[in-house]
Amino acid sequence: MKILQLSYRLPYPLKDGGAIGIYNLTKAYYQLGHQVTLLSFNTKKHFVADENISSVLTSICNLVTVYHNTSLSPIQAFINLIKNKSYHISRFESDDYKTKLIEILQQNNFDLIHIDGAFMASYVAIIKQYSSAKIIVRAHNVEHFIWQKLSANASFPKNIYLKILAAQMKREEIALWKKVDIVAAINQNELKYIANFVGNEKVKMLAAGVFIDEFKIINSVRIDNSTFYLGSMEWMPNTEAVDWFLKEVWPQVIAKIPDATFYLAGRNMPKRYFDLKIKGVKIIGEVEDATAFMHDKQLMIVPLKSGGGVRIKIVEAMAAANAIVATDLAADGLYTTHQKNIVIANEANDMANKIIATLQNKNTLATLRTEARYHAEQYFDQKKLMQEFLNAIH
């Protein structure tokens, strides 16, 4: 098939879940023998110069990029508030992108048009005007869930503004689902939710996976009592999670295991974290090789309190045979089993106690690592997941 993929960000470099999630879909299409044209924003926030875009990306698709500044503007945010229009979506409206999209549609006959996420909702009308191809939207998250949860956890008056953003996003997200031919849901819970608005036939599963063979099992020596967090620190749910963990959970862990270490890594680490002086906490910032970073640590911590979709970093960690302690929300959609291939804890005291107990039991750590890898092999092979999705929509 000839496939046109529209992306709200350049899926490179592969150092955060957002980029990896989009890239893995492109690569899965390619590995299954399909021809992909990727029309991607190259935003100011995630800008990569053309000469620095690796063949890792350009070898699997015909890449076309459009520069666009999606930086937050208080004035535009206020205007959108007055107009009752989602600012998250309007930030991605670009005349240059529209022009390039029309040009590509006029020059090619596509079999499938793949839209990555709700932020690209503005372009559906143009696609329908210039193409008769089947349109799918990949719901990497149900975006309004994120803002609903953030508003619930925020204090006044921020919670009021976030609640309005959530309501605007919900209205426009549902409208998008109804306009396209297929909605590709990332987990079963979100699939069921989306089906309430568009019906069961219009929504299909396309889980977030990895290419299992790329994750080699390395039996390296792991640092005693080492824990870590790895995630993009420009995403509000991640900073919210880390702040809660450092304040409510880590002090209990370090009190029981004085030599424990928590390594905090991720892109765009805010300066305030480097200024922290907390016993046992080491701020790493961005890492060049996420898998290598994981290999010598004993326990991944994912204390997510808000957010949606599937945490691709957890899937990667499982594929790399890592033991994990996470909240229910972080593990949502991963088909995991508590105390078998992951440890679940939601409250601060419970999470601290389970981290302590897991670190102190080497057999538990070993079992969790083995079962995590097996689980990833069974459920999260991206090529297999993509083939099952394509079979379901044809």
Image (cartoon, helix red, strand yellow):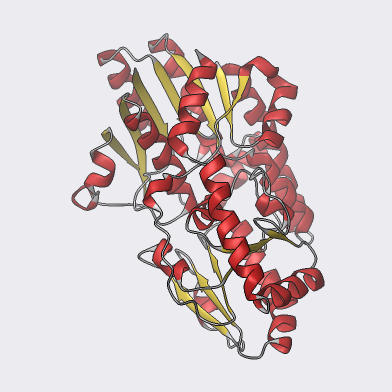
The answer to whether 38 appears left or right of 125 in the picture is left
Q: Position of residue 231 (x, y in %)?
A: 52, 61
Q: Is residue 1 above or below residue 281?
A: above
Residue drawn 46% across the image and 73% down it: 296
Q: Position of residue 124 (x, y in %)?
A: 49, 21
Tell me where residue 59 sits by quadrant: top left
Residue drawn 74% across the image and 74% down it: 352
Residue drawn 27% across the image and 15% down it: 108
Residue drawn 31% across the image and 25% down it: 33
Q: Is residue 365 above or below residue 216?
A: below
The answer to whether 119 appears left or right of 28 in the picture is right
Q: Which part of the image, by quadrant, shows the N terminus?
A: top left
* Residue 348 vs residue 157, the one in the foreground: 348
Q: Position of residue 36 (x, y in %)?
A: 32, 27
- The residue lying furthest to the top in this view is 132
Count all numbered tags in the image, as a single digit: 0
